[in-house]
Amino acid sequence: MGNLTSETIRAEFPVTSSYTYLDSAYWGPYPRRTSEAISDYVSQRSTTAYPFGRAEEDRVFVDGVRAKVATLWGVDPSEVWFPKGTTDAIGSVASALLKPGDEILVGGLDHPADYTVWSNLAERGITVTVVPQREGRMDPSDFERAITPRTRAMGACLVNTYNGYRQNLEALSRVAGDHDLYLFLDAIQGVGHLSIDVAGTNVTMMSAGCYKWLCSPEGLGVAYLNKDVAGKIIPHTAHFYAYEPRGNDWESFIREIFAIGASGSGPRQIPPGALEYPDGANRLEVSPSVISLIGLNQMADLLIEFGGMQAVEERVLSLAVSLRVAAQEHGHQVFSPPEPEGMSGITSVGVADALDFQDFAKGRGVHLCPRPASPIAGEAVRVSPHFFNNEDDIGKFVETLDDYRGR
Ligand SMILES: Cc1ncc(COP(=O)(O)O)c(C=O)c1O
């Protein structure tokens, strides 16, 4: 157990003093230390001259955050990179690895944002085949049955955004390994509250935006890229942060570039292979959003101080179980699948009119999200407690549901 406990973590999140906030699957509130660290940075940037060499300092800082994420995920730091968000990362990797004529199998419960990536792949001549859901769940053996000789990859949401169903990662990874397929995971609804064991699996890449369960600013994602795959990827773009001058220091690199550009005798070509990409996942990185990474850095510390992802998962799942039990005891319908291995921090609860209930609950300081549970379930709200919530919050939610029904 870390320094922070389920009793003390609450004080780190100022939102809890004004609201019963149960909507981290939509938007994660900042911890107090994040708002302090970001405002210190902003005030420093607005009052001091930008010091020469700061870029190098930023690089060291970014690598420090990378190391913390690697610790939380139990992977090598070279397998972590910072994209702009979940789908940015999936699109970058999938479009680099797949070619026209290849096929990718995708999940019938994937998020609409994933479908924009899948459609973009289709426009590149890649066949996208949708594997249907079954009663709000994805079954890895359905993926396996759909494989054809042209199938090269599978793309799936680790945790369903509507009913919170958690995919069987082990089984999906086995299918990927047995059939030599790339596996791309949208994990935005899991990273930050679940312990996701990707090390040693056949997951090719996994990504998450930081603005939900990671309670950090928008415009930043965090991603894993299997080290055996990184070398096969030519990034869709290159940034000087992502290039490592071949054995040269920065000064000689700059001189080399200037020498190419300095020719007074007409155009000159940059020779192919003039530069080398880093070996690791950071070959996919562009200019870092330092301000957003300051937020992620603080949240990573909090997660580590709480005892790591296993401790966070236990806390969040215990709240999800309380919520399910209390809602059912009070006669409300729970749409999220009940099997423990399929649970996440998201619970979908039936309500007569979700939008109207959202307003009603807001009037009592209770925040949640109107979301259909699945293509087959009825009207529902999505409730997503994080590790800073407590049993009183769950009680308040169920009481609000009761009062809404009894109006
Ligand atoms: C499951 C899921 N995937 C993807 C996204 C979009 O993520 P991003 O903006 O980081 O690409 C969302 C946002 O709600 C989501 O819930």
Image (tube, rainbow, N blue to C red):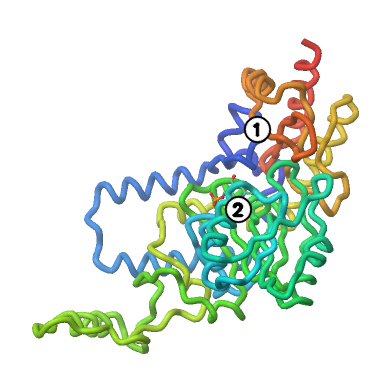
Q: Which of the two labelled residues, at mark 1 and mark 2, occupies the earlier sequence position? A: 2
Residue drawn at x 52%, y 60% as measured from the top left: 123
Taking the image as drawn, is residue 152 in sight?
yes
Looking at this view, name the residue that lies furthest to the bottom.
247
Q: Which residue has dot 2 on it? A: 114
Classify residue 130 by image quadrant: bottom right
Which residue of the protein is positioned furthest toward the top in this rendering? 407
Quadrant housing residue 194: bottom right
The residue nearer to you, when weighing 108 against 371, is: 108
CB under 8 Å between discs 1 and 2: no
User: Circle 2: is it few (<14), some (14-19), or many (20+) Cα within 10 Å?
Assistant: many
Q: Is residue 358 left or right of residue 223?
A: right
Label 2 sits on a secondary structure element that is helix
Q: In which quarter of the image is the N terminus?
A: bottom right
Please name the residue that numbered disc 1 is placed on: 369
Where in the figure is residue 31, as x and y percent of width and height? Answer: 55, 43
- Tell me the SS state at disc 1: strand
Q: In which quarter of the image is the C terminus?
A: top right
Question: Residue pushed farthest left?
Answer: 264
Mark 1 or mark 2, whichever is nearer to me = 2
Which residue corresponds to the image point at 83% horizontal and 41% vertical from the top-left? 321
- Nearest to the observer: residue 158 or residue 294: 158
Q: How far apart are marks 1 and 2 (CA)?
A: 20 Å
- Residue behind label 2 places its C-beta within 8 angstroms of ligand 1: yes
Report x, y in % for residue 384. 70, 39
Identify residue type, mark 2: Asp
Q: In this view, does 312 lie above or below 142?
A: above
Label 1: how many Cα within 10 Å (few below 14, some 14–19, many 20+): many
* Residue under the point 63% across and 41% down: 24
User: Can residue 300 be seen in the rendering of this structure?
Assistant: no
The amino acid at mark 1 is Cys
Does ligand 1 reach within 8 Å of label 1's beta carbon? no
